[in-house]
Image (tube, rainbow, N blue to C red):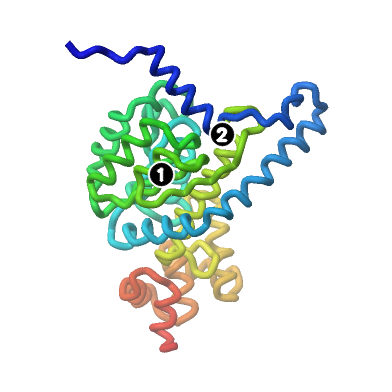
């Protein structure tokens, strides 16, 4: 009969692992925050937050490798899948949910998977992060394959759910990226590209929704945004595939057409009407003089890249 692991031994090993993580350490310089005034607390916390961007800056080569890998999969028709637990999982879900309105993508193109399922987006499902089998199963349920990219996110870098997901994705042939806030991470070892942003101890020891969460958001912003730029979802630094689903976005659409072409509001509005609301098509029509049907054909010929379509039509 096979003996079961001693829970005491398991907890002792976990304590040993956590003791070596900078994100779990207590910063002695902040040991008196419970005695500070509000003004002092604000300055102290801001002083920690400003350390995050430079920490990300030390990992830019790895971020670039991740962007190139993700872009290659998306350009070939694959998907980008984020997976994580707790704050890390919510960061991925947030980014995935914002891609369709921002870049006009299909909701299935960028997907966020969180340990514990949809309930974990709004409330803590703490034990879910310890289930490596569930991490693998949740990725398998999406039929992950060689055409996909999977980004596993974990502040500690050891979350079993994320390790299981990345190992499953890599075995299926997907391009895999690990985003951790400790070096030498388990998820880094499980992925092709390891982005390990060491932000150091948190303002409140162990509260990785703080600097770690900020670092994760910064990196994920780069991965999705720069992949979309490379996919032709912008014209310069302007969103041209946004979905105008509310008044603010309809106003932004018109303003974008005006900025890109130099025309006035009436002409921009008229072009948008003729283009059925497509900012990209409206800009192309104004810049080249094409009608809507010819403009759509030109965009199709350029693979949806507006600048390339303008150049091809203009012969420049």
Residue in the picture at 72% in, 40% down: 46
- How far is disc 2 from disc 1 in space, using C-alphas? 16 Å
In this view of the protein, can residue 125 be seen by the observer? no
Q: Quadrant of the C terminus?
A: bottom left
Residue 263 coordinates in the image, percent (x, y): 58, 75
Residue plotted at (41% across, 32% down)? 159
The image position of residue 16, as x and y in percent, is: 48, 24
Along the viewing direction, whichever of 262 and 30 lies nearer the viewer: 30
Label 1: state its secondary structure.
Answer: helix
Q: Is residue 229 above or below residue 209?
A: below
Quadrant occupied by the N terminus: top left
| Position above or below: 290 against 210 | below
Q: Which residue is mark 1?
A: 188
| Mark 1 burial class by Cα count in 10 Å: few <14, some 14-19, many 20+ | many
Q: Could you tell me which residue is drawn at 28 percent across and 61 percent down?
A: 76
Q: On residue 23, which mark appears?
A: 2
Say if mark 2 contacts mark 1, CB within 8 Å: no
Q: Nearer the viewer, residue 85 or 263?
A: 85
Identity of the residue drawn at 55% across and 72% down: 260
Q: Nearer the viewer, residue 14 or 298?
A: 14
- Across the whole image, how many numbered discs are drawn on residues? 2
Tell me if 44 is positioned left or right of 263 in this view: right
């Amino acid at each position: 009969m096979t003996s079961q692991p001693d829970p005491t031994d398991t907890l002792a090993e976990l304590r040993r692992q956590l003791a070596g993580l900078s994100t779990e350490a207590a910063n002695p310089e902040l040991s008196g925050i419970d005695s500070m005034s509000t003004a002092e607390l604000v300055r102290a916390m801001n002083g920690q937050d400003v350390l995050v961007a430079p920490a990300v800056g030390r990992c830019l080569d790895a971020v670039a490798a991740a962007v190139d890998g993700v872009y290659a999969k998306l350009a070939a028709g694959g998907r980008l899948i984020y997976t994580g637990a707790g704050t890390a999982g919510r960061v991925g879900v947030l980014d995935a949910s914002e891609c369709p309105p921002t870049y006009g993508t299909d909701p299935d193109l960028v997907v966020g998977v969180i340990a514990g399922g949809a309930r974990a987006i709004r409330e803590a499902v703490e034990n879910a992060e310890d289930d490596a089998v569930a991490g693998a199963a949740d990725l398998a349920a999406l039929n992950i394959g060689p055409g996909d990219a999977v980004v596993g996110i974990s502040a500690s870098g050891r979350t079993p759910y994320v390790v299981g997901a990345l190992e499953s994705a890599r075995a299926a042939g997907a391009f895999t990226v690990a985003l951790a806030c400790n070096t030498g991470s388990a998820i880094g070892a499980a992925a092709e590209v390891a982005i390990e942003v060491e932000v150091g101890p948190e303002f409140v020891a162990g509260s990785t929704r703080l600097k770690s969460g900020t670092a994760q958001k910064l990196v994920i912003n780069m991965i999705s945004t720069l992949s979309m730029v490379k996919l032709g979802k912008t014209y310069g630094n302007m969103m041209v595939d946004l979905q105008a689903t509310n008044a603010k976005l309809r106003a932004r659409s018109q303003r974008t057409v005006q900025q890109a072409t130099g025309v006035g509001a009436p002409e921009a509005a008229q072009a948008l009407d003729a283009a059925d609301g497509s900012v990209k098509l409206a800009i192309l029509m104004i810049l080249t003089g094409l009608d809507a049907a010819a403009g759509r054909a030109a965009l199709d010929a350029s693979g949806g890249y507006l600048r390339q379509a303008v150049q091809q039509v203009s012969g420049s």
